[in-house]
Image (cartoon, grey):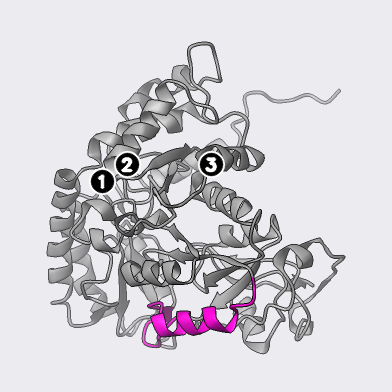
Amino acid sequence: MPTINCNTTSFSLDSLKSACNQLNNHISFHIPGHKGNKQFNQFLKQAEQLDLTELPGLDDLYDPKSHIKDIEKNLSQIYGSNETIISTNGASSLIIASLIELGKSASHIIIPRNCHVSVINGLILTSLTPIWLELDYCDDFKTFTKINLKTLENLILKNINYNIGALLITQPSYAGYLNDVENIASLCAKYNLKLIVDEAHGAHLPFSHQSNYSGLKHKADIVIHSLHKTLSALSQAACLHLSERSGLNAIDLKQNLKLISTTSPSYLIMLSIEDSLKYINDDFISKKILLMEKFLSKLKLIDHIDIFNPATNQDIFHILIKDKNLAASDLMNILIDHNIYPEGIIGDGLLLMPGIGTSTKDVEFILNVLPKTFKYKNNFNKKRPKQNSHLNFDQVMSPSQAYTKPSRLVKTEDSLNLISAQTISKCPPGIPILVPGVKITSEIIESIDDLFVKVVDV
């Protein structure tokens, strides 16, 4: 029998310790929203003792009768929904559970091209076929912008003979763009489509001056929130809200959730959801929004920094910037050298994601660094890497069909005109550049090459 050295620290623990040391006192402009602020989730000091399983006296996440039921009722009251269910498997699981439910009665679903990769995973697990909605596009930042209502209606009419069950939108977009949910909801009602709003990045919206952009405000059938992206809960904390008119059953959705989630849901994450309730209110969030408004007003004064969509329909917790002299990757590296960690690169822009844990000190620090990036303009190759997220998808079979058919690996350069059997996406933000069942084009191959993917499953 081989000897095992039990004194050796695991690679995972080493990595976490190294990351913690590296990130000590760093300025976080990335998820999660609590930013490591000790004001939140103070119960973590007792994490070992509180990491329990379904013991007598503790509630069942999938069939709550007491404590968890109270958390869900409180969330429902705070957000003004008809019913709310929580997940410790993230918003991704709630999206998939929603698609499983929709797939029981529909064959097709309309999905904008900026959806999250979890939507594709949900399609693979159902018989639903996506009808892709092309979005308006910002060439300057190389990112998607709004859902054009005329384009949406034309798409619905073009596919009216299909059994379309719903429209699923991402609100805000990963670049922070806020769509006109009010008129989108009206259009869905006109054609008897359910509206599912992946509002994972917008759990703060209902408590901000931008509340009119929340799916909850306009009675979307399903609204899904991550409670960790801009708010204070731990990663994988999420909730799903049902409106009065949705006609969907929370019990059925929970059964779907059980199919794809662990049988050992984290009570620590549930505790963090309960803790976050203290901070989900107009007063607390408004103070953070005021700080972000001051941040934006000073950012606009920096000559060599451009800001994406600095208008009323840009989410205040998504700040996409571009240096006129530097590629986004170079700007990101400069900020990291100054101990500032952005969320990631979207198109030609660099995404800063503050949250309710962001402090005045954090904002002052980055505002001190950004004006100085001008001096680095001659240190880098000014040629920006090509970003091509504006891809058209020719969906020749459903993702489920393509995923389950026999497939083979081919070199990326040999995949032209073949049918994809896999999903490829860059995370963050997780917008797919290839989906099962899509015919591979030269533009898609170019985008795959940008991610250094050498082989494709077809």
Q: Residue 288, image x and y in percent?
A: 18, 52
Earlier sequence position, callout 3 versus callout 2: 3
Q: Does dot 3 land on a helix, a strand or a loop?
A: loop
Q: Which residue is mark 3?
A: 89
Q: Is residue 328 above or below residue 206?
A: below
Give the residue displayed 41% in from the left and 39% down from the top.
234
Disc 1 is placed on an element classified as loop
What's the distance in space between the residues labelled 3 and 2, CA to CA? Answer: 16 Å
The residue identified by callout 2 is 232
Residue identified by numbered label 1: 357
| Residue type pointed to by label 2 | Ser
The residue segment tinted magenta is 135-162
Q: Secondary structure at mark 2?
A: loop
| Image quarter of residue 268 | top left
Q: Relative to 317, does residue 91 appear above or below in the rendering?
A: above
Ranked by sequence position, the earlier of labels 1 and 2 is 2
Residue at 77% of width from left, 77% of height from top? Answer: 419
